Amino acid sequence: MTILIGVYFSVIQSDAYQEAKHFALTDPEVMNLTGPVSEVTLRFWSGAHVTYSGSGGEASFVLSVKGENEESILDVRMTRAANSWNVIEAYLTTKNQKGIPIKQKTGTPSAYFNVVPRLKLGQVV
């Protein structure tokens, strides 16, 4: 249990998570669907992934987003280039709609997001 707590705090203190949370709090399309966002939390058991080497990397998070009008789930996918995390894809799930594209990636698909299945913490392959 101590290891899981350590992993959780490591994830929520990462630059990637902070950027994903900032996106959830400030993106106009998210706010349009949920109302002004008052709270963003990591859905730890639903998935979190961060990997990087040098100045590049990839990350993905499943976030709970509490807005004035709607509570939703936001799936955020990111890449890191030149030591900066950027949201490349984001999908919002509300009570009435699933997988609403908030931001969609253009260009060549990432090997991680399209080939390797997303694993949940503790899942064995």
Image: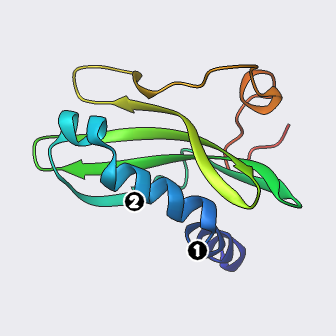
Q: Which residue is mark 2?
A: 41
Q: Label 2 crowding class (10 Å Cα cut-off): few <14, some 14-19, many 20+? A: some
94 or 77, which is in the foreground?
A: 77
User: Which colouring convention does the figure follow?
Assistant: rainbow
Q: Residue at x 42, y 51 (%)?
A: 23
Q: Which quarter of the rendered picture does the N terminus lie within?
A: bottom right
Q: In the displayed structure, would residue 22 be above or below residue 46?
A: below
Q: Nearer the viewer, residue 81 or 79?
A: 81
Q: Where is residue 3 drawn, in percent x and y?
A: 72, 75
Q: What residue do we see at 35% from left, 29% from top?
A: 93
Q: Quadrant of residue 100?
A: top left
Residue at 14%, 44% (x, y): give it: 35
Q: Tell me, for residue 13, which label it has, or none.
A: 1
Q: Amino acid at mark 1?
A: Gln
Q: Position of residue 116 (x, y in %)?
A: 80, 28
Whether residue 122 is visible: no
Residue sitting at x 37%, y 39%: 73
Residue 30 visible in rendering: yes
Quick one: label 1 or label 2, which is nearer the N terminus?
1
Determine whether the residue tagged by mark 2 lies in a helix, strand or loop.
strand
Residue 5 against residue 40 in the figure, above or below: below
User: Considering the numbered disc 1 on the image, is that residue within a helix, a strand or a loop?
Assistant: loop
Circle count: 2
Badge 2 amino acid: Thr
